[in-house]
């Protein structure tokens, strides 16, 4: 096993990067569930910021983290001599692929559209009172339902990685 100058092996470094990517990259996404209700209580005019922040987190933090998780996971499986066919490994890879797919195909485009929709609605309202349209609220509701599903998948993948059922 090759040792790096920091007195750690490449495998240990890979595990550290893997866990850090999960904690930092995916951990931030859990806070997104608080953004919408807080903005609605403060002032619905803050909602475009919510979508811009979610877009930024998902594009520049969660997506790169998912890439690191996959790359280090593949390395660890091969280095440890585990089988990609093991349930806990294959299920974890499926979860990461689902997370990446939903993030890229739904959440990122959805946040772009919802932010633009709100900006138009706020501009149309002028300085007067503003209430988001029913169309916006219905579309935001879908995000509100899918967000916890993503969180459950993240927690399930962590469980599989820690417990390694069947290993």
Image: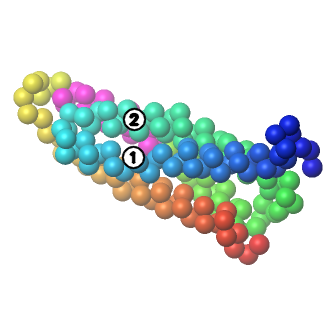
Instruction: Please determine whether, in this image, residue 85 is positioned above or below residue 12.
Output: below
The residue under label 2 is 53
Residue 126 or residue 30, whichever sits in front: 30
User: What's drawn in magenta, residue-wise?
Assistant: 104-122
Instruction: Check residue 32 in the rendering and tell me which mark sits there, or answer none.
Output: 1
Specify which label sits upstream in the sequence, 1 or 2: 1
Q: Percent x, y for residue 113?
A: 35, 34
Residue 158 or residue 137, whichever sits in front: 158
Density class for disc 1 (Cα within 10 Å; few <14, some 14-19, many ≥20) is some
Can residue 109 be seen at all in this image of the molecule? Answer: no
State yes or no: residue 99 in magenta: no
Q: Percent x, y for residue 10?
A: 83, 45
Density class for disc 2 (Cα within 10 Å; few <14, some 14-19, many ≥20) is some
Contact between marks 1 and 2 (CB within 8 A): the answer is: yes
In this image, 54 relative to 20: left or right?
left
Residue at x 77% of width, y 65% of height: 85
Quadrant location, the C terminus: bottom right
Can residue 129 be seen at all in this image of the molecule? Answer: yes
Q: Main secondary structure of the magenta part?
A: helix
Task: Tell me the element at label 1.
Answer: helix
Most distant residue in the left direction: 128
Residue at x 60% of width, y 61% of height: 158
In this image, 53 relative to 161: left or right?
left
Task: Tell me the element at label 2.
Answer: helix
Tally of numbered tags: 2
Instruction: Check residue 141 in the rendering and tell me which mark sits there, or answer none.
Output: none
Residue at x 12% of width, y 35% of height: 130
Instruction: Please determine whether, in this image, residue 46 is positioned above or below residue 162.
Output: above
State the colouring used for the structure image. Answer: rainbow
């Amino acid at each position: 096993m090759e040792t790096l100058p920091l007195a750690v092996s490449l495998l240990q470094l890979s595990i550290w990067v893997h866990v850090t990517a999960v904690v930092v990259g995916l951990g931030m996404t859990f806070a997104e569930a608080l953004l919408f209700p807080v903005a609605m209580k403060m002032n619905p005019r803050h909602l475009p910021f919510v979508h811009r922040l979610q877009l930024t987190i998902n594009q520049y933090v969660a997506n790169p983290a998912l890439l690191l998780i996959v790359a280090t996971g593949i390395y660890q499986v091969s280095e440890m001599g585990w089988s990609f066919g093991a349930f806990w490994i294959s299920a974890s890879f499926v979860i990461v692929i689902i997370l990446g797919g939903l993030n890229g195909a739904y959440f990122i485009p959805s946040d772009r559209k919802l932010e633009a929709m709100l900006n138009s609605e706020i501009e149309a309202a002028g300085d007067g009172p503003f209430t988001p349209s029913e169309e916006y609220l219905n579309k935001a509701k879908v995000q509100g339902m899918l967000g916890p599903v993503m969180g459950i998948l993240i927690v399930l993948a962590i469980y599989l990685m820690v417990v390694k059922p069947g290993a």
